[in-house]
Image (cartoon, helix red, strand yellow):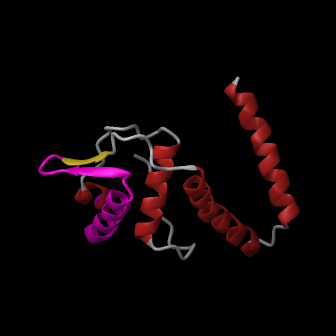
Amino acid sequence: MQIHITSDDGVPIYIQIVNQVKHLVASGRLAPGDEMPPIRALAEQLVVNPNTVARAYLELERGGIVTKRHGAGTYVSEERSPIGPREKLKILTSRVDSLLTEARHLNVELADIIKLIRDRDVVMEKEKV
């Protein structure tokens, strides 16, 4: 499971984990029934406190994204993805906010970002074929 943490964007680490797991589930890269990494293993991978990962898992469990199986670990919920269109846009909003923050630090104009997104979309569409 690929999760990338950044301390630059001001978003708490546990929220970054939650958002990225939601993204992985929404995109199908984490399927229903997939086992999540143990808390300690993910904490070591991300070089964060295990309590941070535990908090993220708790938020994911509350949201119905994952379920805990007592003594057996944490798994992506078997239920149909509770991530609806509104939640998907919320996930993307945090990524857009990070992109815009980075662009402002680099003095890149909004029009250039929009053009870049359109250009990348064209490239990705061609790669799908």
Query: From what the image shows, is residue 10 above or below residue 67?
Result: below
> Residue at horizontal 74%, vertical 68%?
103
Tell whether 18 sits left or right of 78.
Answer: right
Name of the residue lying farthest toward the left: 71
Query: From what the image shows, is residue 32 above or below residue 43?
Result: above
Residue 17 falls in image quadrant: bottom left
Tell whether 20 sits left or right of 112.
Answer: left
Q: Residue 100 lies in magenta, yes or no?
A: no
Q: Residue 71 lies in magenta, yes or no?
A: yes
Q: Nearer the viewer, residue 116 or 29?
A: 29
- Residue 52's x, y, as percent? 32, 70
Query: From what the image shows, is residue 95 above or below residue 76?
Result: below
Q: Nearer the viewer, residue 108 or 19?
A: 19
Q: Nearer the viewer, residue 104 or 64?
A: 64
Tell whether 43 sits left or right of 118.
Answer: left
> Residue at horizontal 56%, vertical 58%?
91
> Residue at horizontal 62%, vertical 56%?
89
Count of marks overlaid on the render: 0
Name of the residue lying farthest toward the right: 111
Tell whether 128 sits left or right of 75.
Answer: right
- Residue 101's x, y, as percent? 69, 72
- Residue 88's x, y, as percent? 57, 53
> Residue at horizontal 36%, vertical 41%?
79
Image quadrant occupied by the C terminus: top right
Highlighted magenta segment, given as a residue range? 44-72
